[in-house]
Amino acid sequence: MLDQDTARALLHLADETQARLILVGDRHQLPAVGRGGVLDLAIRYAPDRVIQLDTVRRFTDPAYAELSLRMRTGEKPGEVFDELVRRGEIVVHASDVERQQKLAVRTTYGELVVADTREQVARINGLAHQVRKAVGEVTDAVVTASGERIGVGDKIATRRNDRDTDVANRETWTVLACDNGTLTLHGNAGKRVLPPDYVRAHVELAYATTAYGAQGSTVPTSHVLIGEHTGAASAYVGMTRGRERNVAHLVAESVEDARTQWIDVFGRDRADLGPAHAREAAAEAVDRYGPNAPKRPAVRRPVVRRHDDDFGYRPPSPSPSSSPSLGL
């Protein structure tokens, strides 16, 4: 997820301090938000210092480790889906509402839920808060600027680096206490106290997350929402977070419908495979659609016949005084 500008800054600091910089990553996962291809460039400039890891160590089941490699490359997605069905790791839901409700309950057990969009994440987080409040595990204490209700016992994330309070973006915490909008938190870094202004603007519930938020995590069980916005990279990330189990959840009319959706997902590859891969893809697009591409037969459009009930209607012509449109 390292972008080129940040990589250049790190290299500059390494030169100044005579430090060694080690880049570790998987180019089939989600790319940097900025200009990517850092690993590809590093391999080009330091080819004799590249170590390729070829053993999967995250999963307790060796068979799933092999399956994860097939998801990584996107090979034979239909066969991968069939194997996941056999393993009981595909769940088909009748509606998105049902799926969100069931996954909200899973998050209350501490299991990771990975969704496509921040809107889906917000809905699942809100449902999870309601479930925990109904059983007396959390309270309503503050309302954030986005309308989320957060209370003692909730799992939250800080979404902005702040030197004064010593918190970082995407760190997760448990709320220990609330006093007039001030939250006392506990996390892996210890205890922190957040003032009301930061809480309102930069805190959110963290029961579910996007694939970007999940990338780098290792948990016992991961649940992944698969839908029309899911790409191959995000599906691969979500389905490889769980050490013991990874479950895909789809909304479909049948298992066959779900299988078709799964195959479509792995045809939408948003992984950053570097400048060399981008150059090959661009050359292929030029060959297919450029000026030297094979001519396609012209499409014959049907003649629109005027009926008696048209009443002679024609769209109004633009006013002479209107500004001319730009021909882009």
Image (cartoon, grey):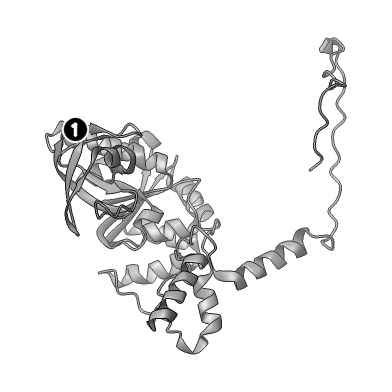
Q: Nearer the viewer, residue 184 or 104?
A: 184
Q: Residue 288 in the image: x percent, y percent?
A: 75, 61
**Residue placed under numbered mark 1 in the picture:** 141
Residue at image coords 41%, 43% = 118
Q: Is residue 19 left or right of residue 187?
A: right
Q: Is residue 62 left or right of residue 82?
A: left
Residue at image coords 31%, 46% = 208
Q: Is residue 303 left or right of residue 87?
A: right
Q: Residue 16 in the image: x percent, y percent?
A: 42, 79
Against 46, residue 223 (above or below) is: above
Q: Quadrant of residue 243?
A: bottom left
Against 34, residue 119 (above or below) is: above
Q: Nearer the viewer, residue 16 or 64?
A: 16
Q: Residue 76 in the image: x percent, y percent?
A: 50, 64
Task: Label 1, secondary structure: give it.
Answer: loop
Can residue 73 be seen? yes
Against 108, residue 27 (above or below) is: below
